[in-house]
Amino acid sequence: MRVRVRAPRCIYKPDPTRAWVSYSCPPLSSSSSSSGLLPGFLSSPCRRRRLAVEEQRQAQVNFIMSLEVAGAGVPQAQGKFLGILVCWVLGNGSLFAWNSMLTIEDYYSILFPTYHPTRVLTIAYQPFAFGITCILTYHEAKLNTRKRNLIGFALFLISSFALIMLDIGTKGRGGLGPFIGVCIISALFGTADASVQGGLVGDLSFMCPEFIQSFLAGLAASGVLTSALRLITKAAFENSQNGLRNGAILFFSITCFFELVCLLLYAYVFPKLPIVKYYRSKAAAEGSKTVASDLAAAGISNEQSIQAEEDPKKCDRLSTKELLIQNIDYAFDIFLIYVLTLSIFPGFLSEDTGAHSLGTWYALTLIAMYNVWDLIGRYLPLIKCIKLTSRKGLTGAILARFLFIPAFYFTAKYGDQGYMIFLTSFLGLTNGFLTGPEQNALGNVLVVCLLGGIFSGVVLDWLWLIGKGW
């Protein structure tokens, strides 16, 4: 005769100092254990699954409690200031290598005078950045975000070091071979940018708004920082023998070090911040499939697949196509912003503005002014009285920027360097003021539109050469 033994009652004991839960179960009676039969509550797969789901949900609740007990409640969670700082550095690192290549144009213009290096290097960069971003955006819900970002920063580091080795190996000589090598490295920068920028926008969009704002500010500050470093290294070696090349090598050495810092910060510091653990646990509970490895790196288990089996509707999410349809005007706006900007910057400013009293410093000054005012423009929306809240008003302002094309044409032909510096500053100001990604997959979609606009602008930039013999 088989006797069914009632399962002993499990008593839940919350531990506010830990990110998991514990269950205290009384031992089974000797009769039940000697019978050789499993308790009823363990013999049912459905009940075991429900118990696992309940444990995971309670673990996430307890993790939030552990932050609050430590005085780290949301939004003032522990590690928030350090997280904002790290996000700013990561934003810098996402564009630092590419901005370095753009800012070094005075060296490459002398090294490769017949190849239009500013325009060609941008053409080599953008197809990879745009194409790979499209592919990654299509598959973004299935990707391992942590590996994607780590690969991107590692590629930035390796490519920057390769640029130094190429210059040392060729002893600073020009020619077609070294130029092709520089173009290949530019394409690698584009690949790394596609991996990092969209991945970090999606990753940070799960978290507090200050993180994504800090990251975007870092993107803008990257241009200012690289311009400042280039001006310093150029001035330091201006009067020395072979000074332009030595300054360029020092500049790229700084770039290598900075990318190494970004790689280490993202790999070992950022995932272990309590506030980051909190938001990633919350994202996993809401159905995100891209944060599992991030939680593992922080020492948190993720049983979201079990939750999805138990409650499939809980893990429903909008598709990338649905997000695009709902925000098509934002996508169109970001595309138009960068079509216009990249049709002028940096190719036209570097090669088509003529010779002036500033000499070799002129193009560097224009690029620096653009970057400075682009950074200022990104902070202007914080002033409520001038913030654009109307979607139609935003689109109208973006369309009005196309008046820059005739303005730059006539200024380059008839104006002095002061007018060109003013116009370039205004171009940067409006670019920064009107730029801004949205959330998660939407952030990835807008990064695609941004890079699509950049690629189109880079191609259109060649139209300035019509009638100039090339």
Image: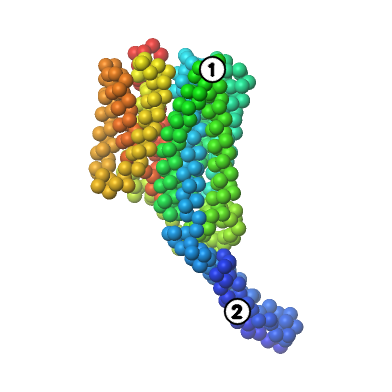
For marks 1 and 2, give the one nearer the viewer. 1
Q: Is 357 left or right of 9, judged from the image as shown?
A: left
Q: Nearer the viewer, residue 216 or 7?
A: 216
Identify which residue is drawn at 32% across, 25% down. Answer: 421
In the figure, residue 370 lies in which quadrant?
top left
Q: Which residue is mark 1?
A: 240
| Amino acid carrying mark 2 in the image | Cys
Closer to the chain start, of discs 1 and 2, is 2
Q: Is residue 29 left or right of residue 370?
A: right
Are the residues flagged by discs 1 and 2 in contact, CB closer than 8 Å? no
Distance, label 1 to label 2, CA atoms, is 78 Å
Place of residue 449 in the rendered image (x, y in percent of width and height, measured from the top left): 39, 39
Residue at 70%, 79% in the rendered image: 37
Which quarter of the figure is the N terminus placed in? bottom right
Residue designated by label 2 = 10
Relative to 294, say whether 233 is above or below. above
Mark 1: amino acid: Ser
Residue 325's spot in the image, x, y percent? Answer: 35, 47
Query: Extreme right residue here?
Result: 34
Q: Give the residue at x 41% y 52%.
A: 209
Quarter of the image with the C terminus is top left
Identify the element where label 2 is drawn: loop
Give the label on residue 418, or none: none
- What SS does tag 1 mark? loop
Q: Could one spot residue 204 in this view of the protein?
A: no
Is 400 on the left or on the right of 272, as rendered?
Answer: left
